[in-house]
Image (cartoon, rainbow, N blue to C red):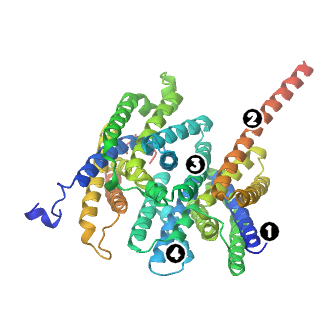
Amino acid sequence: MSGPLSWLVEPGFFSTSTVQSALLVGGVVSFTSGVVGLFTVVRRQSFAGEALGDVGATGGSGAFLISVNPLWGFVGAALLAAGVIEGIGTRRAQSRDLATGIVLGAALGIAALFLYFDTTHSSTTGASISVLFGSLFVIDTSSIPVIVGLSAAVLVVVLLLYRPLLLSTLSPDLAQARGVRVRLVGAGYLVAMAVAVSLAALTIGAVLSTALLIGPPATALRLAKRPGFAALAGGAIGVAATWLGILLAYDSFYWPPVQHGWPVSFLIVAVVFTFYLLASALTVGRRRKAMAHHEAPVLWVAGE
Amino acid sequence: MFSGLMLNTWIAASVVAVVCGTIGFFVVLRGSAFVAHTIPNGAFAGAAGASLIGANTILGLGVFSLLGALGIGWLGRRGRHDVVTGLALVLMLGLGSLFLSFSVEYAPEIYSLLFGEVLGISRSELWPIAGLGIVCLAAVALVFRPLLFSSVLPDVARARGVRDYRMELCFVLLVALTTTVTVPIVGTFLMFSLMVAPTGAARSFTSRPGMAVVISVAIALATVWLSIAVSYETNWPIGFFVGMSGAFSYGSGRLFAAWRQSHAFHRRSGLTAEAA
């Protein structure tokens, strides 16, 4: 690539196959996380989202140990954890938080054991570390169709659950009165979130999966007023952050202090966080103006 | 098992268990397990940064856990609390991966901070650990009543003039202080397990706050001692045993609570039958 953009986009960016698959998989996964994450943020389940990513990583290293495709380890462990959290968690926020913490603690203990087996039996110390931090540039191309398919399935589930889920999130009592099975809808959503998070944790690392699940939707909630629009905006912001991060990581091979590139996970997280801060600054300004004009507040994000 | 270096390990781990069991009471009461997960994990980035510039890793740990606590406290005033916590976590972990990528040499002791091993602790390291542990406990004792008040009945506490925001700040700073004491010894994962599981179990056995703290400390101590002993015998990582006994003690607490409930129910129904 040459011309006016070449100062921003280093030559060869779009023609490199690792970059192409990073853009594709990163885009799919971050869009899914952004859409799914809207409900994670509104339902205050960020901790469950983070825990499911870590649990998925544990399952991934377990699968690695018995040489099964890590994809199934990730998805299976996250689904199991979602089942346990839903099983012992009640509707009280504190008990849910505690149940999530217990599951996470147990999973981390098992992760320590797997790490020990990894290092003593096959001497691949880096495995668990790379599972934790992940890298978009080492995606196994053969699992791309499965990842895309599962992401599409998650989006379909969220679309089907959309209306009852929205109602039971904003007003559980009203939803119950209208005949929505609140507990079942919540469990269905948790399963969808578990799959989305574990796919993200597999492809881009457990750290980034949390960042993309929470950051873009929280940003979108600051900007958008209608829930459907906020979901799409969350997905779009996620994709934008991921692609910008990948671009920066590609460019960073010539940055100081070391000439081997900055980690893509850091760059994406930094972009996500910057978006969030900008949107927060924007809303504070807008809210002040609204207060001055006595505008009615936006009701559906009343939890804010 | 009890000689030389191992004796230091036992002492240090006991200090950690007492401190974590105490702070954990408030972690569970406030539903702040996410904060207890975030601050130690994020502080790992500080250790990585400190080793990059050649400073003391414990200093880096302390600075980052303090910054993380203040950031969560400050940003959490406006945004959603769990969202802010999550963003703080990923930002700090992202910084950690950046620092690690800058440092040319492989840093095993940084990774051991993450996964945690009660490794050889020298006699000279014991004193600062014990001192900081006492500071932690004294700080808890100082804010115990107002913090308990605002954790259980935030509205009433606010009406009585206890400031929510100030209490939240106290709480996150306590977690940060505990992180600095605990993480160098047992690592972030162990610290999290020790803060959440023992109190989670203790809650099922009593409803009195003072008693809950005592039981929680006792369970934490039992967990740590049992885990060290079994880990010493089997050579398996201690984190595995701590995680498992945490899940086990929580599970038995839940079972006990369920049993007591049904027992009380039967007794009550028996009484009414007699009265009739």
Along the viewing direction, whichever of B218 and B230 lies nearer the viewer? B230
Earlier sequence position, callout 4 versus callout 1: 1
Report the residue at 74% width, 65% height from top. Answer: B14
Earlier sequence position, callout 2 versus callout 4: 4
Q: Are marks 1 and 3 on the same chain?
A: no
Q: Are marks 2 and 4 in contact (CB under 8 Å)?
A: no
Mark 3 crowd level (few <14, some 14–19, many ≥20, 10 Å Cα):
many
Report the residue at 44% width, 74% height from top. Answer: B105
Q: Quadrant of the C terminus of chain B?
A: top right
> In 3D space, how far apart are the residues under numbered discs 2 and 3 (Cα atoms)?
25 Å
Q: Are marks 4 and 1 on the same chain?
A: yes
Mark 2 crowd level (few <14, some 14–19, many ≥20, 10 Å Cα):
few
Q: Which residue is labeled 1 in the image?
A: B2
Q: Which structural element holds mark 3?
A: helix
Is residue A196 at least partly visible in the picture?
A: yes
Q: Which residue is labeled 3 in the image?
A: A107
In percent of width and height, residue B25 lies at: 69, 55
> In 3D space, how far apart are the residues under numbered discs 2 and 4 (Cα atoms)?
45 Å
> In 3D space, how far apart are the residues under numbered discs 2 and 1 (Cα atoms)?
39 Å
Q: Which residue is labeled 4 in the image?
A: B60
Q: Quadrant of the N terminus of chain B?
A: bottom right
Most extreme residue toward the front is: A121
Q: Which residue is labeled 2 in the image?
A: B258
Q: Nearer the viewer, mark 1 or mark 3?
A: 1
Going by the image, does B105 lie left or right of B139?
left
Q: Which structural element holds mark 1?
A: loop
